[in-house]
Amino acid sequence: MSAARDEVLARIRAAISAPTQAHLPVPREYRTSTTLGADEAIELFVDRLVDYKATVHRTDSAGLSSTLSSVLNSDKSVVIPPGIPAQWRTACTDGVRLVLVDGDPAPLTAGQLDEVGAVVTACRVAIAETGTIVLDAAPDQGRRILTLVPDHHVVVVFAEQVVASVPESLIRLEPTRPLTFISGPSATSDIEFKRVEGVHGPRVLDVIVVS
Amino acid sequence: MTHTFLGLPAYAPEGVGNLRGDETFPHAARSALKNTQLRRNLGIATSTIRAKRAAVVGELPDWEQLRDAGAAIKADVMARLPELLEQLEAAVTARGGVVHWARDADEANRIVIELVQATGAREVVKVKSMATQEIGLNEALEAAGISPVETDLAELIVQLGHDKPSHILVPAIHRNRSEIRETFLREMPDVPDDLSDEPRVLAMAARAHLRRKFLSAKVGISGANFAVAETGTLTVLESEGNGRMCLTLPETLITVMGIEKLVPTWRDLEVFLQLLPRSSTGERMNPYTSMWTGVTPGDGPQSFHLVLLDNGRTAALSDEVGRAALHCIRCSACLNVCPIYERTGGNAYGSVYPGPIGAILSPQLTGIRGHGDPNSSLPFASTLCGACYAVCPVKIDIPSILVHLRAQTVDHARAERLPNAELLSMKAVGWTMRSPLRFGRAERLLRIGRLLGWRRGRISALPWPGSAWTTSRDLAVPPKETFREWWLRERGQPGPPGDVGGSP
């Protein structure tokens, strides 16, 4: 193994005629900040999500509970990560719904999650220009598997989490956490280039924007 | 394995992997052009993606600045590649991953097979990956008694149909819905007999077929779009969620990545996460992007292996002009704008890397083994129109590299003293044009051509050696009068000798 390592590195050094430790200059004339106001950013974010066929619900913190329970109306069971606020958890339990908490008492298996209808999570940051929601597996978002196996993902986005552009989002993220960027429900255009929404990931994405 | 000199850049070995077809491009293209289904599908797909790309690229006022940054970052990566690879290795190792180095396809395949065998798994789930197609990993796994399951819908269609991918982004674009339905009925034991050919129904059949495989998978195999040297973070961009499944559910994850797919810093991703989706699928962002750094306790695979692959990349890197081909981020925008690709499709190129980028990448990875090598014909599979350069998100000057590689091929033929139609005709033209007398006679001789095409105004068939031209294109009928005859008639005297440029 180390012989291969040494040889590949030696080949590269031989191939680069003038090996250098100096960095070549990178022009960064592209936009790294925005002139978009907070409200404009949210409007743009919602517009992008709708374009991706995600369902968007606008509410305020007082209306969050009732929005959550109505979005979950047709789900018989829901899984939540251990760290979501108690208020959300109560809203999920509303009615006769079965609520599973990942890690309480034990982490759920893929097989168990396959039987669950929906998952409710928070997010880390959202990008308006691209309609993207980023999860970083914090306790209010849970392990990556939670938002992957259930067929219905409900994600709560707070207005202050919405940034305008990709560069503004990356500085808010910790690269070594497991990150998932979600831009609409899963989709494919592999058959005759006809778009089909919903393949392996959750086929329904509900986004609750709290202003 | 034979290594003559330690540390000399080496081409990808023959006899393994999918970097070279069986026949030259003109031969393969001739049969591809007869496939009307293929041409119709390609026409629809390429024009649709072109329009989508143009729309979302137009939304960004700083697109050109992003391209400039992307090109500069990649040039910086190539200049500092040894240092950056060592940095990546250290970062991945520090976070619980294991880094392996593979000189070529055989070595990479052997590493992956041994890793899979160590887990005891007989089946692996795969995310669409150009690198693993390049090295023929599926064939090697099958030979070792391990079943690779392609999980991208198009790759699954290609795999179940025992077919070859024809586009980097939409590999099954040459198949229509009824062909796909028949493949599914034949190869998937669990689909109902009354399966319709609606794309949605077919996609749901694939979902059901793969779901049990995902939930029980022990080993996942992926490629990588980017690796961040400073943090050890790996990235996969995808649409269907099959990537997330393969990267999250198995206990063991093996990622095979070309040594050139690095970016130096986390911040650099802000450039490529904007360039790639818009150039590739014509979306503002692809539905899913996954990023992981080594192993995260309790979340996702608890065993992670990264295989860093050379397989001819160092040979490409040693060519100062050609090395820019390694900047490629596999978006496939150049395929969709190429007038050649649009008509022949990907299979005519023989390699897993088709289109304009394939025409410069494949021959550089494999080297040209001499006269008749299919890859020696690839740099000629272009009109040099430059559309590929105009859309490339990292500004690879593909036309210039094509010309550079053509020159190498011609030099190669000259060195081998092979009879070469192009060299002979250039010599003949040179001899004719050196003398005004000979040139004048040749001009008058050409007028015979008027007889051949007098009815239609063009010539469609010439005897050999002219047939080399007319088998693929028409020739305009020569005019009644040459320029010099017209000059003589209008001005009554020959032009001043040597006055080529003319004066107003």
Image (cartoon, coloured by chain):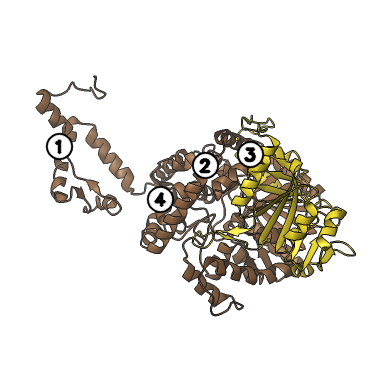
Q: Are marks 4 and 1 in contact (CB under 8 Å)?
A: no
Image spot of residue B302 (x, y percent):
80, 59
The three-letter code of the residue at mark 3 reads Val
Tell me whether circle 4 and circle 3 mark residues in contact (CB < 8 Å).
Answer: no
Q: Amino acid at mark 4?
A: Ile
Chain B is shown in which shade?
brown
Q: Left or right: where does residue B156 sit relative to residue B49? A: right
| Residue B423: quarter of image | top left
Disc 4 or 1, which lies upstream in sequence?
Answer: 4
Q: Position of residue B104 (x, y in %)?
A: 62, 54
State yes or no: discs 2 and 1 in contact (Cβ < 8 Å). Answer: no
Query: Label 1: few (<14), some or many (≥20) within 10 Å?
Result: few
| Labelled disc at residue B340 | 4
Local secondary structure at mark 2:
loop
- Chain A is shown in which shade? yellow
The mark that comes first in sequence, 1 or 3, is: 3
Labels 4 and 1 in the same subunit = yes
- Which chain's residue wears label 2? B
Quadrant in which residue B344 is drawn: bottom left
- In the picture shown, does residue B290 fall above or below B396? below
Single out the mark in the foreground, 4 or 1: 4
- Find disc 2 in the rendering and name its residue: B392
| Distance Cα–Cα, label 4 vs label 2 | 16 Å
Tag 2: amino acid:
Cys
Image vertical order of residue B390 relative to residue B38, above or below: above
Please name whichever residue, B365 or A110, is drawn nearer the observer in this view of the structure: A110
Q: Identity of the amino acid at label 1?
A: Arg
CA gap, disc 4 to disc 1? Answer: 36 Å
Q: Where residue A34 sits in the image (x, y, percent)?
A: 66, 33
Q: Secondary structure at mark 3?
A: helix
Numbered tag placed on residue B116 in the rendering: none
User: Mark 4 Cα within 10 Å, few/some/many (few <14, many 20+)?
Assistant: some
